[in-house]
Image (cartoon, rainbow, N blue to C red):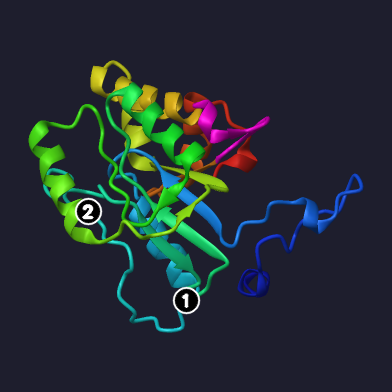
Amino acid sequence: MFVDVYSYTPGAWIEMSGGMKFSDYNVPETTSLILVGPKGSGKSSLINKISRVFEDDKFAPERAQVSYNLSVGDGTYFLQEYMIPRGSTSFCLYDTRGLSDVSSDNMQMLKHWITKGVRHGELAIRNSDSPSIRARMKCKARQSGYNSSKTRLVNFVIFVVNGLSVLKSIDSCDDGASQFYIQTIAEMFCCPYLSFRAEKCNLYYLGAVKKSSSIRIIGRPYLLALPEDRVA
């Protein structure tokens, strides 16, 4: 598996079926994957875990900044691009801003990323953001110097949720906030922008090692009625 990833170049696994030739395909220079999910679901942590698999230096610092206290800090307001493996141009992962409590904001954001592409350092601002946040983040965007970053089309999407939060929400089924959390996840996962023909994006449960079996058995059908091979 690792040998294939290290030696992989975009288009290397194309099936030449139906009389198609390699030149008939629009092959990207870099295969781009974006991670989406609620705030605090573990998107940044997952990027660090994936990157660490390919790191020769076990003491290398984490690449993606992780928010350990959701009540403070700005979170991932700016899209962050991480080449995998480090220094390669074959794959890149994008860390994105957590989903909003406002469904229309999420739909608009996902539509933009999927149809227009993503860019390192791109500001992910929403209509529901307060005027002070919008002004502060736009000021940071002007100072960042990311405007020259290359825009990449999205090839794959990984939907990340916190497994323990899902189980707690299921256990607190009478609580309005818990129901809203589950509803938001299900609604966004079923968003048409996260589908390719009949295929859905992959769902990744994070932060639930000891309860992984419970989540796969309970959370999968409860949330999304997903086939098991789409859940990690």
Q: Is residue 204 above or below residue 224?
A: below
Q: Which contiguous range is marked in magenta?
A: 191-201
198 is within the stretch colored magenta: yes
Find residue 138 and report its image quarter. Answer: top left
Residue shown at 11% from the left, 41% from the top: 135
Residue shown at 21% from the left, 27% from the top: 128
Disc with the residue nearer the chain's start (2 vs 1): 2
Q: Could you say which is closer to the camera, residue 167 or residue 87?
A: 87
**Can residue 210 be seen here?**
no
**Can residue 106 be seen here?**
yes
- Residue kind at label 2, given as amino acid type: Ser
Q: Could you say which is closer to the camera, residue 15 or residue 123?
A: 123
Residue 49: percent from left, percent from top: 42, 64
- Dot 1 corresponds to which residue? 87
Residue shown at 22% from the left, 60% from the top: 144
User: Taking 71 as reference, is 202 left or right?
Assistant: right
Residue 184: percent from left, percent from top: 37, 25
Give the secondary structure at mark 2: loop
Other residues around mark 1 within 10 Å, as few (<14) / some (14–19) / many (≥20): few
Residue shown at 34% from the left, 22% from the top: 104
160 is within the stretch colored magenta: no
Other residues around mark 2 within 10 Å, as few (<14) / some (14–19) / many (≥20): some
- Dot 2 corresponds to which residue? 67
CA distance separating discs 2 and 1: 25 Å
Give the secondary structure at mark 1: loop
